[in-house]
Image (cartoon, rainbow, N blue to C red):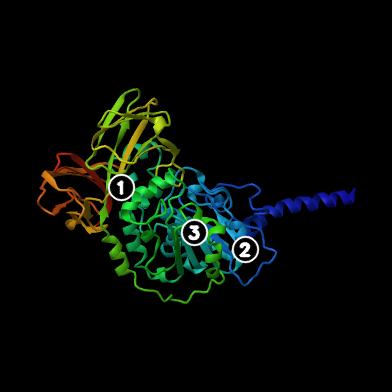
Amino acid sequence: MRLMRRCVALLIVFFIMVPMISTNVRAEVVKELKTGFPDQEAFTPGEWFLGQKPANYDENRPPILFVQGRNGNADSWYGKTVYHDMNDMYDYALKAGYQTVFIQLYDAAGKGSASQWDNGKLLAQKLEEIYNHFGKKVNIVAHSKGGIDTQAALVGYGANRFVGNVITLATPHHGSNLADLSYSWWAGWLASILGQKDDGTYSLQMGEMAKFRSTIDNNPAAKLNRYYTATGTSWGPVFSALSMGGLYLSSYGSNDGLVNEWSAKLPYGTHLFTDSKFDHDNIRKGSAVFARIEPYLRTANVPVPALVASSTSTNENIEQLNTTSNQNILGGELPQNQWIEQTVTVDKKAEGIVSILTASSDVEVQMISPKGKMYTNKDSVITTGEDESFFGGATIRTFKFDKMDVGEWKVKMMAKQSKDAYLVVSDYKSGAPFVLQMPTKVKANKSEYKLKKSPVAPEMKGDLSITVRVVNKEGKLVSEFNELQNVNNNTFTGALKNIKQPGVYNVTMDIKGMNKEGQPYNRTIVKSVYVEK
């Protein structure tokens, strides 16, 4: 009886002490991956856990923390990819003898993507916990927006002292023009219904990233870690949402379906490679890149300050990048059980791709050529926008034409749902006729732009009509104005109007004219701009 009382007393003490130990010593409650997957994966922001300790573990090598991209969670590194089967990054790191660490940021809750400042603040707090757990620095491998979240943590919130090297894979360090598109005048309805207008998407606009870069790159702490970058230039599977993104971004240069190559580089970083085999999805796979990035993960010792080039000139070059477009963009609301009609003009017989995005999958679509031939849903390739894309959840109908007939094409749509919207993006495979010159970062009193004819611009007659719409962060129309320009001028100049407050504004320009044969043409240019005080 006495022995039983002693056992009960010991059990009581044990159950009292265990919560105290697990509360005060963070390492005691760290979850560990056993077989490539967590036993019970949680999606709570701030949750972090360890991969299995390798059999060939080398204590001299720093742990690797993996930071996923927009709308991602920890299983982005060991679960299914969008197009390329399972991600084997964890397996490759484990077999190479590295202790791995995984973390859930705010996006893991499934309520949209957070800004880099919110994710960065959370990441900075957890980096200190991880550093205390190991008693040494970790290296970071980040995919897509995860690289921007990482920089916010290291530079903006002072977590650089917990980290050595940072490798970013397809990170849009200077933004993505697809984010600009999602916040444009024409795409506003669709993006709102899809729930894609969130802080994370907003932060990836070109203008917003110009603002971010001016804050981060001018901070001396940006040079306290070594950054290595890598990207790809494949657009993924044909007719995928990724390939549609690649087509849109092709006006701005080579890209991986979501991010242009020039945006994936840092002026004070070392660019490891650009590989035409990799798209935005498979560049995070271990079998694709681990052998090429592993040499930079072997140590976390960084000379202070790191010997890197100045970032000023490179950032200025990116801010001055010209914007070209050989696309026509239309969009808006789709009322229930009513036919909505839009006109797409083709001024020159050329290969064309028309992508029609809708919020729901049961929208009836008709395309009618100038000769009266009708194309319907069955003539299109239908895909769905994945979570990582800027129109996640949208139904995408892609119509591909080897030679589009010259003249006016009718696009008719009828929605069956009470809440729906559309976006029509027509892309013509020929030279872009106009070039927009407007810095991504401007002063409030110098928000000027130049629209130039390109060498391949068609001969025109009559006046050129330019409609400019400026939208603020809340999606409200700040200004809308139309200007008529003489077609004999090679350069058309103007200025954004009613910009009274500093901030990021989205600019949509619709250019309409008529070629010498009397055929009308439309082109749309979208660009965000950061207006300083």
Residue 533 appears in the rendering: no
- The residue singled out by tag 2 in the image is 99
The three-letter amino acid code for the residue at tag 2 is Gln
Q: Residue at x 55, y 68 (%)?
A: 297
Residue 491 occupies which quadrant of the picture? bottom left
Residue with the most extreme right position:
1
Residue 437 occupies which quadrant of the picture? bottom left
Name the secondary structure under disc 2. loop
Residue 267 or residue 289, whichever sits in front: 289
Q: Quadrant of the C terminus?
A: bottom left
Is residue 465 left or right of 130 when viewed as pictured?
left
Answer above or below: position of 457 versus 186. below
Nearest to the eye among marks 3 and 1: give it.
Answer: 1
Name the secondary structure under disc 1. loop
Residue 372 or residue 509, whichever sits in front: 372
Sooner in the amino-acid sequence: mark 3 or mark 1? 3
Q: Residue at x 28, y 61 (%)?
A: 319
Is residue 529 left or right of 275 when viewed as pictured?
left
In the image, residue 295 lies at what x, y percent?
Answer: 54, 70
- The residue singled out by tag 3 in the image is 142
Sooner in the amino-acid sequence: mark 1 or mark 2? 2
Q: CA distance from mark 1 to mark 2?
A: 48 Å
Sooner in the amino-acid sequence: mark 3 or mark 2? 2
Task: Determine crowd level at label 1: few under 14, some 14-19, many 20+ residues with C-alpha closer than 10 A.
Answer: some
- The residue singled out by tag 1 in the image is 429
Name the secondary structure under disc 3. strand
In the image, residue 103 lies at what x, y percent?
Answer: 55, 55
